[in-house]
Structure formats: C-alpha cells, structure tokens
Image (tube, rainbow, N blue to C red):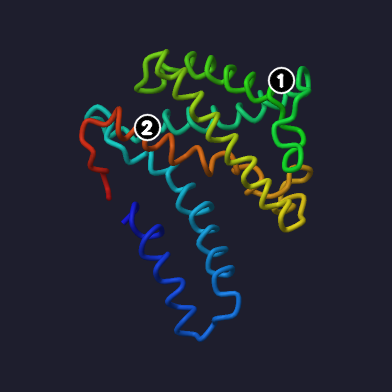
Amino acid sequence: MFVLLIPVYVFLFIPIRMVIAGEYKNFMERSAKIQWGLMCCVFCVSHAPAILKLNINGSNDGNIELLIFFVIIVQLNDVMQYCWGTTFGKRKITPKISPNKTWAGFIGGVLSVGGIGAALAWATPFSPWQAFFVSMVIAIAGFCGDITLSAIKRDVGIKDYGNLIEGHGGILDRIDSLCFAAPIFFHIVRFFFVENEMLIGF
C-alpha cells in the first residue's frame, strides 16, 4: 500500500470524486494541484520514515542512524550551498526563480556534503566511497526540490509557504529539499543495499 495508495488509488479517486460531485469548472487545474500536493508533500516525504522499515543486511534495527544521516546531508547541503554561494558565487543558475542559487554554491555544496557523507559512512551500510557518491546524489536531488518548489512560490506570488518559523517561512520551506531527495535515497538503499526486497511491515 505504501507504493500504491497515493500514486495510484488516490490519484484515481480524486478526479472521480470531482466528477461525481459535478465539479467540472477548471477540472484539470484543480485536480492537478491536489495531486501534485499529495505527491510532493505526502508521498515523496513519506519515503524518509519508510527508511526505518528497510531490511538492510538482514537486520531490523530500525535504521535510525541511516535516517539521521539522510536528514543531516540534506540540511547541510542547503547550508553549504549558501556558504559557497555567498563567498564565491557569481553565475546564477536560475535567476528568475531562485536568484541566490549560483553554480559555485551548487558545486561547492555538493562536493562538501559528499565529503561529510564519506566521514559519516560508519553510521550507514555504505563504504566511504559509496557514502560520498550517495551524498552527492542526495544533494543534487535536494537542490532540484528546492528550486522546483521555489518556482511554485513564484507562480502563485508568495515569498514563503507559511510563517510558522520566524524568518524562515513555513515547514514546507524547510523540507523542500527533502521532498525530492527522500524517494531517491530510499530507492538507492532499497535496490542496492537490501538483501530482501520485501519491506518489513508493508
């Protein structure tokens, strides 16, 4: 159900529910918005706690260290990209969408968290080199999530998704990178580091 409920059954249910209710005006736009919100904010994010259910090397210890590793890499990627970008950044990647994102920040951040990931390999099933490359993949996916959700904010004309965190926007502003990185990381671990592909508990 984890891999089927939202991307299949809920996606089918939403337009059917709208049709039965006779709601046909702006049908495509409204259903697409709901489906995109569910996919990004529920389905994609749910891959992070799903890491705890993976049976890695026959062990069912909860994988809490692996989840912490993932969150650290994603959050430090944002920090490192900001630091590299403000120090050396000149060429902007997407000036109309996220003007603070620069090539120097992106490359510096990806390489930096790659090194951090390698140093934290002891907390994962990865070798240091594997942790290095996995961390860089997470960083790239997180960057894509960041600028994609920034594009949505520009489209609807808002600065932040909320004001829950003073000076930092809402919760979604803090987990935008995680939305894209979580499913990528989950599937890397599941397909390359899980002996039995069955998910414990699902």
173 with respect to 4 (left or right): right
Residue 158, given in percent of the width and then of the height, sits at 76, 54
Q: Is residue 174 or residue 97 the one in the foreground?
A: 97
The amino acid type, in three-letter code, at marker 1 is: Trp
User: Looking at the picture, does residue 101 appear above or below residue 90?
Assistant: below
Q: Residue 77 occupies which quadrant of the picture? A: top right
The amino acid type, in three-letter code, at marker 2 is: Ile
Q: Which residue is mark 1?
A: 84
Residue 23, given in percent of the width and then of the height, sits at 54, 82
Mark 1 crowdedness (10 Å alpha carbons): few <14, some 14-19, many ≥20: many
**Please, what secondary structure does the residue beneath circle 2 have?**
helix
Of pointers 2 and 1, the one earlier in the residue sequence: 1
Residue 114, given in percent of the width and then of the height, sits at 52, 18
Q: Residue 167 occupies which quadrant of the picture? A: top right
Q: Which residue is mark 2?
A: 188
x 77%, y 36%: residue: 99
